[in-house]
Image: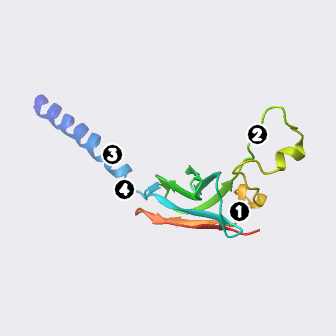
């Protein structure tokens, strides 16, 4: 009888090992399919920078903005996301003025954008991510 109980106990343990991970994955998905598109500012592609998607659970993913204005986030947080766009000035070439005013001047591909798009608290860019691949073009307004 004790060997029967031991076998029953092992069976229950095995069942828990199999069922618990499955039950944990039955909740809403945390990650959606890829999201890709272009980023435009003043009717032209933004040629550098980064795009970040942040959902209400705090999951975030980002992607680089390519020179043609395109981006692709491979694994995007699932659900409604707030989107930020960040551009960073290229450093001036060695030997040039590095004053704060010089850093604000465009160098190379850098384009200054309104500061509101760079912060989660102030951006008005939103997108709902699903499990399937999606396209979302980001249009920044002056």
- Label count reads 4
Residue position for label 4: 26
Q: CA distance from mark 2 to mark 1?
A: 26 Å
| Left or right: 95 as drawn, with respect to 20 | right
Which of the two labelled residues, at mark 2 and mark 1, occupies the earlier sequence position?
2
Which of the two labelled residues, at mark 2 and mark 4, occupies the earlier sequence position?
4
Residue position for label 3: 20
Residue drawn 73% across and 43% down?
90
Dot 4 lies on which element? loop
Dot 1 lies on which element? loop
Which of the two labelled residues, at mark 1 and mark 4, occupies the earlier sequence position?
4
Q: CA distance from mark 2 to mark 4?
A: 48 Å
Residue drawn 23% across and 38% down?
14
Disc number at residue 123? 1
- Quarter location, residue 44: bottom right
Residue position for label 2: 91
Decide: few, some or many residues near mark 4? Use Cα within 10 Å; few <14, some 14-19, many ≥20: few
């Amino acid at each position: 009888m004790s060997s029967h109980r031991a076998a029953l106990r092992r069976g229950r343990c095995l069942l828990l090992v199999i069922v618990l991970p499955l039950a944990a994955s039955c909740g809403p998905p945390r990650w959606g399919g890829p999201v890709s598109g272009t980023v435009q500012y003043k009717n032209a592609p933004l040629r550098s920078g980064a795009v970040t998607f942040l959902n209400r659970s705090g999951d975030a993913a980002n992607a680089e903005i390519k020179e043609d204005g395109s981006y692709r986030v491979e694994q995007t947080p699932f659900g409604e996301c707030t989107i930020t766009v960040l551009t960073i000035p290229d450093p001036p070439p060695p030997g040039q003025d590095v004053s704060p005013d010089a850093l604000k001047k465009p160098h190379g591909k850098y384009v200054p954008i309104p500061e509101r798009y760079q912060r989660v608290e102030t951006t008005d860019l939103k997108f709902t991510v699903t499990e399937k691949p999606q396209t979302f073009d980001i249009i920044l307004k002056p």
